[in-house]
Image: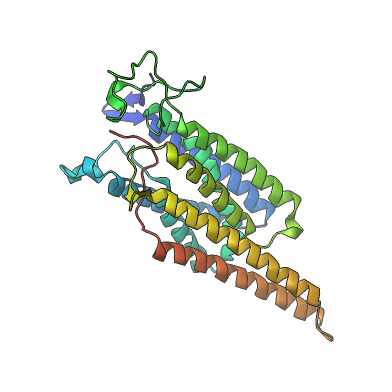
């Protein structure tokens, strides 16, 4: 069984969960800095923005987890802020981190859509690397499986649904949901970076961001039925509702925005329109894209619960 402790320095204990999160941030920086350079963006703004978004994502993820697993903290709420900080929920981190990124881009008078295309790739990079922290904590697993990549779970880390008396450690393995999310993050990152670089003229600023959110939400939506003891809303897992809403909103925006662009392209430039007029029209289109992305984020922040479902299927 994996040991959750990576190493200790005197009284200071370093957990693998934190190590994986830190490595995830390194992966995010490598991916985002590469894409920022390719798009001619300021790396200084990226570095400062990453710090702000990372802090906001941690707060949002912790908040979602605490609400989701309130029964664990109700007897002693002080544990919410005490280590180990192994309980984080991706949807909460995604919502609050996105909001922080949008506000920072506005503050810096930057194009939200252009930065969103770069920044959201970090979601998949973090998912690919940081999810392995769940492996060391023996969490984020699904039901028993006979598949060769199933993982064993200690009796102390199991939910009541799978007691060792009925599911012996020696013969019982579980779906590694963290692995499925990690693999999805790697594949999604490769595919979407390829699309961004291969078809730049066919994309509208903000398209890559919408595709990233759709990919992430689809992954979570497909894996949600494997989870147990989730935060539900009228019997339906809250994360499923959130992810389905994100998928519909993102796909709808992509379809509508490209339909508008095709309509504008068929009309062609008005007689007497100069090159400057065309450039102004293009700039206006980018501004409109920024507004659409902002409105989508604001709508998600206002219309969806800013609370988070734990990023693990199980945490005792």
User: Quick one: quadrant of the N terminus?
Assistant: top left
Q: Nearer the viewer, residue 85 or 107?
A: 85
Q: Residue furthest top?
A: 170
> Which residue is painted at 44% across and 22% down in the image?
151
Measured along the vertical axis of the image, is residue 206 above or below residue 175? below
- From the viewer's perspective, tell me whether residue 167 is left or right of residue 176: left
- Most distant residue in the right direction: 271
* Left or right of residue 285: residue 60: left
Q: Residue at x 33, y 21 (%)?
A: 154
Tally of numbered discs: 0
- Percent position of residue 87, x then y: 33, 40
Locate residue 254, reporting x and y percent: 63, 61
Whether 84 is drawn above or below 166: the answer is below
Residue drawn at (56%, 34%), measured in percent from left and top? 183
Q: Quadrant of the C terminus?
A: top left
Give the image location of residue 96, x and y in percent: 41, 56
Q: Please state which of residues 195 and 57 is positioned toward the viewer in this rendering.
A: 195
Q: Nearest the camera: 158 or 114?
A: 158
């Amino acid at each position: 069984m994996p040991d959750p402790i990576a190493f200790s320095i005197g009284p200071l204990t370093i957990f693998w969960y934190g190590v994986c999160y830190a490595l995830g941030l390194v992966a995010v920086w490598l991916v985002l800095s590469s894409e920022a350079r390719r798009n001619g963006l300021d790396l200084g703004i990226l570095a400062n923005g990453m710090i702000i978004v990372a802090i906001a994502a941690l707060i949002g993820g912790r908040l979602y987890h605490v609400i989701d697993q309130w029964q664990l903290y109700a007897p002693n709420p002080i544990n919410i802020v005490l280590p180990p900080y192994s309980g984080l929920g991706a949807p909460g981190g995604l919502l609050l981190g996105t909001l922080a990124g949008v506000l920072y881009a506005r503050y810096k008078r930057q194009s939200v859509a252009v930065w969103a295309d770069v920044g959201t790739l970090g979601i998949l990079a973090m998912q690919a690397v940081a999810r392995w922290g769940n492996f060391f904590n023996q969490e984020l697993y699904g039901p028993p499986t006979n598949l060769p990549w199933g993982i064993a779970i200690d009796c102390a880390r199991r939910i009541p649904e799978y007691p060792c008396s009925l599911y012996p450690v020696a013969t019982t393995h579980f779906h590694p949901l963290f692995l499925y999310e990690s693999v999805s993050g790697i594949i999604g990152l490769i595919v979407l970076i390829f699309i961004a670089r291969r078809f730049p003229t066919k994309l509208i600023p903000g398209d890559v961001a919408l595709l990233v959110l759709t990919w992430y939400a689809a992954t979570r939506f497909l894996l949600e039925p494997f989870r147990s003891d989730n935060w539900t809303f009228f019997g339906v897992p809250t994360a499923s509702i959130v992810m389905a809403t994100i998928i519909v909103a993102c796909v709808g925006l992509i379809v509508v925005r490209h339909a508008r662009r095709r309509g504008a392209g068929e009309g062609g430039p008005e007689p007497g329109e100069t090159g400057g007029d065309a450039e102004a029209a293009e700039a206006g289109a980018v501004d409109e894209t920024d507004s659409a992305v902002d409105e989508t984020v604001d709508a998600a922040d206002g219309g969806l619960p800013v609370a988070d479902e734990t990023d693990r299927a199980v945490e005792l």
